[in-house]
Image (cartoon, rainbow, N blue to C red):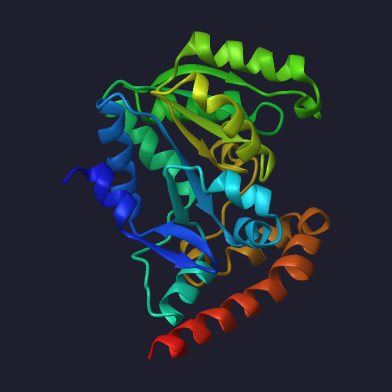
């Protein structure tokens, strides 16, 4: 059985959303194996906010379900999966995969394109990833103007740029749901390319935003670290939207466990 078939078959359902049961290393190996076979794909790293949005917006959920892989990016998702009796092996975070996939891609001389991010971060992140992984090829970087998604001409410019660059991997750092909508529009033009939405990861790589210490990541407290750095931008998302949702998620998970016993 091929790694592709294994990855698709070994999945769980959490709050109505399919999540592939795989480690970060397995995710990277799957991407590279499929790339070697000439097959592209799309990875959605489902964090708590993306999962919440998928439960509220059926069109967005259907769009994300088109992805090749959906992996759990967030300790609350791992805890809920364990509660319902369908444990996942580990968190697969976009902010970690950008490093591990770039390292593996560099060993094979593959190319990456960095799309999005805050001003200057795509170029800085590309330089750092290249310095860290000398074999990695930087196919290009581009930061669209604010509101680009409302202009068809802007989308077409991005499409042309990517088709000409023809990268093996595209990291899209536009935040959710914007990055998922853009990937869905463009991926058909590059059927051999792998696409990953990585949120704020360019700012992490470039050092503009500090990622939480490892112990906070393991304890599911990374959101506290982020909130302390950007309280005005993140307070509503974390405290008003996500916090009540996590309790509903845990309640549904416990209910599924008991209904199966």
Query: In which image quadrant can residue 48 be found?
Result: bottom right
Q: In the rendered view of the protein, which quadrant contains the C terminus? A: bottom left
Outermost residue on the left side: it is 1
Is residue 95 rendered to the left or right of residue 249?
left
**Residue 199 picture quarter:** top right
The image position of residue 209, as x and y in percent, is 64, 46
Residue at image position (16%, 46%) is 1
Percent across and percent down for residue 71 are 44, 54
Seen in the picture, residue 116 relative to 53 is either above or below; the reply is above
**Image coords of residue 20 (percent x, y):** 38, 56
Tell which of 179 and 108 is nearer to you. 179
Q: Quadrant of residue 97?
A: top left
Nearer to me, 22 or 114? 22
Q: Residue at x 62, y 43 (%)?
A: 200
Picture residue at 64% right of the left edge, 78% below the top? 248
| Residue lying at 71% horizontally and 28% vertically, measured from the top left | 119
Direction from residue 122 to residue 128 in the image, left or right? left
16 and 23: which is toward the camera: 16
Residue 115 higher or lower than 196, as above or below: above
* Residue 140 image point, x, y percent: 53, 16
The residue furthest top is 164
């Amino acid at each position: 059985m091929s790694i592709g078939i294994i990855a698709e078959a070994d999945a769980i359902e959490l709050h109505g959303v399919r999540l592939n049961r795989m480690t970060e290393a397995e995710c990277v190996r799957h991407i590279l194996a499929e790339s070697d076979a000439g097959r592209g794909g799309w990875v959605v790293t489902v964090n708590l906010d993306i999962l919440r949005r998928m439960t509220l917006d059926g069109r967005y959920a259907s769009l994300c379900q088109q992805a090749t892989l959906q992996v759990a990016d967030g300790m609350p998702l791992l805890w809920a999966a364990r509660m319902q009796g369908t444990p996942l092996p580990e968190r697969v975070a976009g902010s970690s995969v950008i490093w591990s996939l770039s390292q593996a891609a560099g060993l094979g001389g593959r190319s990456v394109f960095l799309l999005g991010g805050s001003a200057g971060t795509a170029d800085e992140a590309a330089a750092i990833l290249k310095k860290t992984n000398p074999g990695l090829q930087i196919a290009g970087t581009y930061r669209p103007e604010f509101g680009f998604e409302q202009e068809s001409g802007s989308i077409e410019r991005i499409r042309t740029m990517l088709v000409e660059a023809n990268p093996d991997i595209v990291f899209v750092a536009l935040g959710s749901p914007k990055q998922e909508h853009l990937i869905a529009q463009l991926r058909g033009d590059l059927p051999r390319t792998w696409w990953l939405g990585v949120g704020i990861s360019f700012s992490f790589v470039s050092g503009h935003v500090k990622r939480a210490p490892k112990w906070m990541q393991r304890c599911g407290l990374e959101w506290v670290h982020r909130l302390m750095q950007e309280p005005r931008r993140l307070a509503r998302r974390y405290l008003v939207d996500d916090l009540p949702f996590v309790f509903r998620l845990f309640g549904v998970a416990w209910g599924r466990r008991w209904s199966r016993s």
